[in-house]
Image (cartoon, rainbow, N blue to C red):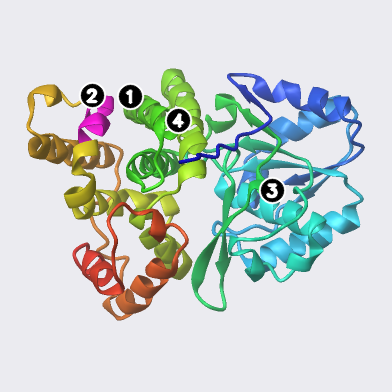
Amino acid sequence: MVNKIVLNTISYHGKGAIANIPTEIKARGYQKVFVCTDPDLLKFGVAQKVTAILDDNGIPYEIYSDIKANPTIANVQNGVAAFKASGADMIVTIGGGSAMDTAKAIGIIAENPEFADVRSLEGVAPTKKHATFTIAVPTTAGTAAEVTINYVITDVEKKRKFVCVDTNDIPEIAVVDPDMMATMPKGLTAATGMDALTHAIEGYITKGACAISDMFHLEAIRLISASLRGAVQNTPEGREGMALGQYIAGMGFSNVGLGIVHSMAHGLSALYDTPHGVACAIILPTGLEYNLPVAGKRYRAVGKAMGVEGIDAMSDDDAALATIAAVKQLSADVGIPADLKGILKEEDVAFLAESAYADACRPGNPRDTSVEEIVDLYKGLM
């Protein structure tokens, strides 16, 4: 079996990493930057940490921030028009998955205009040219969009999210600076952190898992489990551990896929604007229970990476159950709800199940499923 691994050409990690952005821009001779970020990061001065460095180095830029929490087709199309009008020749995207996913789609369409409808990018799109040169600066420790070949766009008209998978969309440079994440509120830190844990665990048990991705995912699980509680309390050690852990998880799952947890979570965000990380965290234990019959033997390594005491001496069944319990406990410790009560409406279950089955993440699930089984999984969380 041949495994393909795609990563950033260059990545920077650690406090103060954003200082390297002007050097990378100037070394390549770019003249103007299209800054893609979201309104809240401008409002609270987070994006300005990067634009101030551009100012200090005499690098002109134009800001685009017409981006929703779950970015839409319109956000992308407006961004493409703004990019073309700006005269910029590269992109710096600052933010969580929303800003980075929007920037990826803008960069792809700018170089491959035949996909201007955006919907045609769903799945594995046959783009021919790499996206506009992009530097990605994450401000959340969760999505790992800065190192993945995936992005997710919301189709408001059809009330669904669609996943795009394209090696041409990966940013050439990732700048992972924990200082850019220090102002995240507790709720967002918890949600994005559980998204990262879901990436690592689903990536570890997915059908496409390989030795290289296993190495990434187990280390990511270890770092995230050791760091998330501290990150929610805004400790430097917690922030640094999460910044690295979520990136390493992205190195893995981007190349081998995810599973049913993400496919079910996408619909909740599209229909109710549920934060993606919250949806993933709520569904993750249910997904693990569902996948026990085919993937349960892999749970011992997950639990060991999470620090479950005595797991080596347990039977496979007990180790699997202890691992699921540890996931539930971490989620509870950082304030994530235990179920979908107050979120999920019964009249939407059938539509959500069909959407989850059609989602690009579903085929990677270790256990083959059906729309009817997904209906039951949703109902079990109500």
Q: Residue at x 36, y 44 (%)?
A: 198
The earlier-in-sequence mark between 3 and 4 is 3
Give, as a single range, the part of the protein colored magenta.
299-306
Residue 129, x across and y down, in percent: 78, 51
Q: Which mark is residue 226?
A: 1
Q: Residue at x 23, y 45 (%)?
A: 295
The residue wearing badge 3 is 168
**Which quarter shows the C terminus?**
bottom left
Q: Position of residue 32 (x, y in %)?
A: 89, 40
Compared with residue 10, is residue 107 higher up or lower down, i.e. above or below?
below
State the separation of the CA atoms marked 3 and 4. 21 Å
Q: Earlier in the sequence, mark 2 or mark 4?
A: 4
Picture quadrant of residue 214:
top left
Real-space Cα separation, disc 2 to disc 4, in angstroms: 22 Å
- Residue contact at pointers 2 and 1, CB within 8 angstroms: yes
Q: Establish if 226 lies above or below 119.
A: above
| Residue 195 rendering spot, x and y as whole percentages | 41, 44
| Dot placed on the residue nearer the N-terminal end, 4 or 1 | 4
Q: Could you classify mark 1 by the number of other residues whose Cα lies within 10 Å: few (under 14), some (14-19), or many (20 or more)?
A: some
Q: Is residue 37 left or right of residue 68?
A: right
| Number of other residues with Cα within 10 Å of mark 2, as a class: few under 14, some 14 to 19, many 20 or more | some
Specify which label sits upstream in the sequence, 3 or 1.
3
Q: Residue furthest front?
A: 1
Residue type, numbered disc 2: Gly
Mark pair 3, 1: CA separation: 33 Å
Going by the numbered disc 4, the residue's amino acid type is Ile
User: For residue 212, which numbered disc appears in the image?
Assistant: 4
**Quadrant holding the N terminus:** top left
Please name the residue shown 42% across and 67% down the image: 272
Residue at image mark 2: 307
| Mark 1 residue type | Ala
